[in-house]
């Protein structure tokens, strides 16, 4: 079966890590005899914005809607285009229009990587953040009034719907059922955010009734961030609203050494629309153009895409290759500077592609 994949590198280091993601996919396709077709798109980038005055063409939904998956880099060049314009004009449109309501973000301490947390070794940090991806704190409900006067007011509402919460919770509980520890943690803040968060807690309690095998706990987001650092071994599946999930999914990977390794899958579980696979990190303007960005987040996202497309073995082989290359140790692996080495993006990408081919 062939799969048609949209390739959208975006901005900054998106352009540098994307070729390594594609290289890994091509290596996996050769080894597992997969038929992957790639089409490159230059929109959803600030270069496109400079040329056209908008982030995407009007018919972007038609161009991407028939794809089997979207492989995405990162967007944002805040010195040229304000972030809320570039991101609401691209990535956030994809997530919403294609109803990618689950943002699945694994967080795993890999062999050969030193955690900034004392005495943590592989196996101590291995959990998923399941982030609600289409509503919550990321709403466009609100506005600015009495602009420029002393009475200026800005309001932005949090929108939570029963359907929107229940469907992401169901995904998270189902995921927890597949894990040996069968544990689910909910991120809340129902002590201070007194309307939406108690409602989130109610929906979690209701959903838990249908999953008696799962042990469920919850923490307010403030102490939860502390516990990510102090007790990362407590966590298995962590489910969170859009903003809380965003924060946790940078903090978790930082505890595993660098956000440069973290992948994500923006999933429309029903398959009505293409799902989107991208690293958790952004366009990193501070290091863009130097060829030193860590490509592992992009490559691991490729693995998640392969699994989503039904090629479980190929996805697993890509993750195994990443782990083997890292486990070979700093003397044998061209680690990028965020991992303490002097390697380049393409050297590390090539080492992983070779490991995929070698099997
Ligand atoms: P960022 O993730 O781009 O960078 C944060 C820090 O991590 C920087 O110091 C950067 O050099 C480092 N870093 C990130 N990825 C790395 C990698 N692969 N290898 C090595 N180091 C890496 O976050 P930011 O600085 O807050 O945002 C920069 C731009 O990216 C902004 O425009 C922001 O809106 C955008 N952004 C986009 C996405 C996305 O497209 N999904 C995600 C986050 C941020
Ligand atoms: C992410 C990013 C985006 C988000 C930004 C760039 C809008 O931080 O994918 O985590 O907040 O979702
Ligand atoms: Mn983020």
Image (spheres, rainbow, N blue to C red):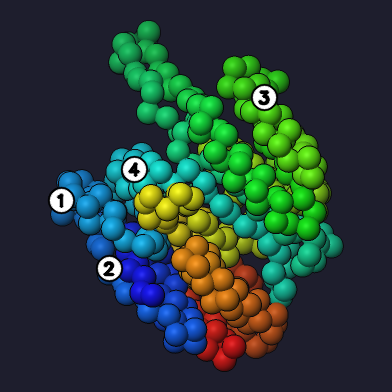
Mark 3–mark 4 Cα distance, whole angstroms, equals: 28 Å
Q: Earlier in the sequence, mark 1 or mark 4?
A: 1
Mark 2–mark 4 Cα distance, whole angstroms, equals: 20 Å
Look at mark 4 in the image and give the residue it sits on: 97
Position in image of residue 349 (x %, y %)? 49, 79
Look at mark 3 in the image and give the residue it sits on: 202
Q: Quadrant of residue 8?
A: bottom left
Look at mark 1 in the image and give the residue it sits on: 52
- Which residue is outermost to the top? 151
Label at residue 340: none
Mark 1–mark 4 Cα distance, whole angstroms, equals: 21 Å
Q: Residues within 10 Å of mark 4 (few under 14, many from 20)?
A: few
Q: Residue 64 or 91: which is nearer the viewer?
A: 64
Left or right, 73 with reference to 280: left
**Does any portion of residue 114 appear in the rendered image?**
yes
Look at mark 2 in the image and give the residue it sits on: 40
The answer to whether mark 2 and mark 4 are in CB contact below 8 A is no
Position in image of residue 138 (x %, y %)? 45, 33
Q: How many marks?
A: 4
């Amino acid at each position: 079966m062939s799969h048609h994949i949209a390739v959208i590198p975006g901005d900054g280091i998106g352009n540098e890590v994307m070729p390594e993601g594609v290289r890994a996919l091509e290596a996996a396709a050769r080894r597992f005899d997969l038929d992957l077709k790639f089409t490159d798109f230059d929109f959803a980038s600030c270069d496109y914005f400079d040329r056209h005055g908008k982030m995407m063409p009007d018919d972007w939904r038609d161009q991407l809607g028939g794809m089997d998956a979207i492989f995405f880099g990162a967007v944002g060049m805040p010195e040229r285009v304000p972030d809320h314009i570039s991101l609401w004009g691209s990535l956030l449109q994809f997530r919403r229009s294609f109803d990618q309501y689950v943002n699945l973000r694994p967080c795993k301490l890999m062999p050969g990587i030193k955690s900034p947390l004392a005495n943590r070794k592989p196996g101590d940090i291995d959990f998923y953040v399941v982030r609600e991806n289409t509503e919550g704190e990321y709403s466009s409900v609100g506005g600015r009034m009495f602009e420029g006067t002393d009475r200026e007011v800005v309001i932005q509402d949090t929108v939570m719907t029963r359907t929107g919460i229940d469907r992401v919770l169901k995904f998270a509980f189902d995921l927890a059922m597949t894990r040996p520890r069968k544990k689910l943690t909910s991120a809340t803040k129902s002590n201070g955010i007194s309307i939406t968060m108690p409602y989130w807690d109610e929906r979690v309690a209701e959903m838990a009734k249908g999953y008696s095998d799962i042990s469920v706990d919850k923490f307010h987001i403030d102490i939860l961030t502390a516990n990510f650092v102090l007790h990362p071994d407590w966590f298995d599946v962590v489910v969170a609203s859009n903003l809380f999930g965003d924060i946790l999914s940078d903090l978790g990977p930082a505890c595993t050494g660098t956000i440069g390794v973290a992948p994500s899958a923006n999933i429309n579980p029903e398959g009505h629309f293409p799902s989107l696979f991208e690293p958790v990190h952004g366009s990193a303007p501070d290091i863009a153009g130097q060829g030193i960005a860590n490509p592992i987040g992009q490559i691991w996202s490729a693995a998640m895409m392969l699994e989503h497309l039904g090629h479980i073995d190929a996805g697993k082989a890509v993750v195994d290759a990443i782990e083997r290359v890292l486990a070979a140790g700093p003397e044998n692996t061209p680690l990028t500077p965020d991992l303490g080495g002097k390697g380049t993006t393409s050297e590390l990408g090539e080492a992983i592609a070779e490991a995929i081919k070698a099997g």
